[in-house]
Amino acid sequence: MNRLFRKQCQKVMAIIILWVLLLPSAQIGAKEKIPLPAHVVLFKAQQLMEKEKYTQAAHILKTFQDKGENRWRPGDPDPRGRHHHLIAFTRANCYLMADQPAKAVPQYRAAVLAKPDFSSAWMNLAKCQYDLNDYVHASHAFLKGYETDADKKPQILYYAAVCLLTADAKTLALPLFERLSKRHPHAIKSEWKETIVQAYLSVDRPRKALPFIEELSEITSGTRQVRWQEVRLQQYLALDMKVKALKYVKWLIRQYPTEPKWWQGLAHLHLNANRYKPALTALTVKSFLAPLTAQETKLAADLNMTLDIPVLAVRLYEKILSQKMTSDGQIKIARGYIRLHQPETALKWLNQESGLKDDLKRMVLKGEILYKLARYAEALSVFTAAANQKIEPGYAWLMAGYAAWAMGDVAKSRQAFKKAIKYPRQQKAAQKGLQRMF
C-alpha cells in the first residue's frame, strides 16, 4: 500500500514545483510590496534560475540575506528586504531544483514564518519533507497549504492524508479523509476513493468503507469493476448482511450470467444458510462455466451425498481420489457405493493401497461391510485389531462379539462381549449378547 501512496505523491509533487516556481517573478511586479534591494536581487536570481543556474542563484540570495543577519531580529524593521519571505522562498526553490531538499527546508520554514498564509511555500515545504521521508511533517505542511490556499484545492487535502498513510499513521489520516469527503464530495476521484477504502479497512472500519466500495463497484469499469464487485460482496458477507448479499449476487448473475465467480458466490451464500439444494445447483452451473477447484469438487461431491444423489457423488469422489488418495476420501466413496448397494466396490476402495495408516473410521467401516457380506472371520479380525488399537474399543469389541457368534465361535464371542460390557455405551447390547449364549 505504501508503495502505491508514494507513487501517487511523487506525481503530484512534480506538478506543484513547476507551478510555484513561476510565482516569484509574477509577485515581484504586482501583489507584493518588496523593497527595491530585495527586488533587484530576486530579479537577478530569477534570471539565473531560468538558465538552470540554481547554485549561483542561491548563492546571490544567501549573500544578500547574510549581510544583515547579525544585526536583525524577528520584528525588527527590514528596509532592504533581506528577510522578506520571497527571498527565503526563492532561495529554497533553488535548493529544491538542485535536488537539495535538506537545504531547502529551513528556507521554506523561514518563508512561512514570515508569511504564515504563504500556501505555495507550505506545499513546497511538504514536497521537501516528503523527499526526506519526513511524512508526518509533510502532511502538516500540506494541510497548512490547503488551509491557506484561496481555492481550497481538494487534492492538497488528499495528499496530506496520504502522507499520514505512508507514515503508517492511519488513524490520523482518517479525519482528513472525512474532511475531504464532507467538503469536496463531488471532487473525489475514483483513485482517491480506493485509497480511502484501503485506509478504513486497514483499521478495521469496514462499515465506513462500504459506501465507497458500493460506489466504486458502480462507477469503475472492466477488471477494476469486477474487483470492486467482489470486494462489495465480500464485505456484505463479512458484515453479516446476508439479505443484501443474496440480493446483490442475484443482481450480478442477471447482469453477468456467464461469469462463474457470481455463481460461486451464490453457492457460498446458500451453503452458509444450509440451503444445500440451491447451493448444489449454483455450483453445478459454475462447473459448466469454469472448472471446479479441488475444494469445490469435494464440496459438490459432499452435497450430492447429503442430498441423496450418491451416483453423482461417487463420480466426483473418484475424480478427487485419482489425483490424491486420502483416508477421508476412501471413506466417503465407500459410503457412496454402500448407498448404491455395491458393498464389494465399497470394500475395494477401502482396501486400496494408499500408504495410509488404518484409522478409526476406515477400519470400523471396513469391518461393518465385511460383516454385512457375511465374511465374519475377516470382520472379526478387523474389529479385534481396531479394539486392540483402542479405536472405538467398546463398539469394536461389541461387533467382534457379533462376528464371532455368527461364525459359531462362542468362546471368542463371549470374550469379546465381556470386554465390550466395560464400556457404558455398549453395556446393554453386550449383556444381551451374553444372555443369548445361555
Image (tube, rainbow, N blue to C red):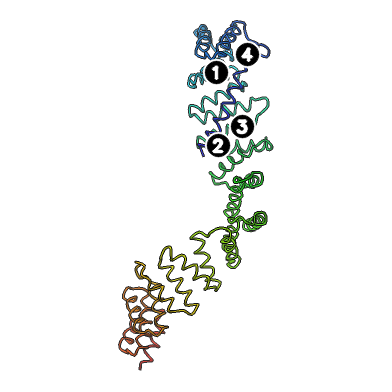
Q: Dot 1, how many residues are within 10 Å of its Cα: few (below 14), some (14-19), or many (20+)? A: many
Tell me the number on the disc at residue 157.
3
Q: Which is in the foreground here, disc 2 or disc 3? A: 3
Determine which of the numbered discs, if any, sits on residue 172 in the image: 2
Query: Which numbered mark, 2 or 4, is in the foreground of this view?
Result: 4
Element at badge 3? helix
Decide: few, some or many residues near mark 4? Use Cα within 10 Å; few <14, some 14-19, many ≥20. Answer: some
Quarter holding residue 433: bottom left
Q: CA distance from mark 1 to mark 3?
A: 22 Å
Residue 127 spot, x, y in % from top left: 54, 26
What is the secondary structure assignment of the residue under circle 4? Answer: helix
Q: Which mark sits nearer the N-terminus, 2 or 4?
A: 4
Q: Disc 4 marks which amino acid?
A: Ser
Q: Position of residue 24 (x, y in %)?
A: 61, 15
Asked if disc 1 and disc 3 are in contact, CB closer than 8 Å, the reply is: no
Q: Give the Cα separation between the discs numbered 1 and 4.
A: 13 Å
Assess whether mark 3 and mark 2 are in contact (beta carbons under 8 angstroms): no
Q: Nearer the viewer, residue 145 or 269?
A: 269
The disc labelled 1 sits on which kind of residue?
Asn
Query: Looking at the picture, does residue 87 appear above or below residue 321?
Result: above
Foreground tag (1 vs 3): 1
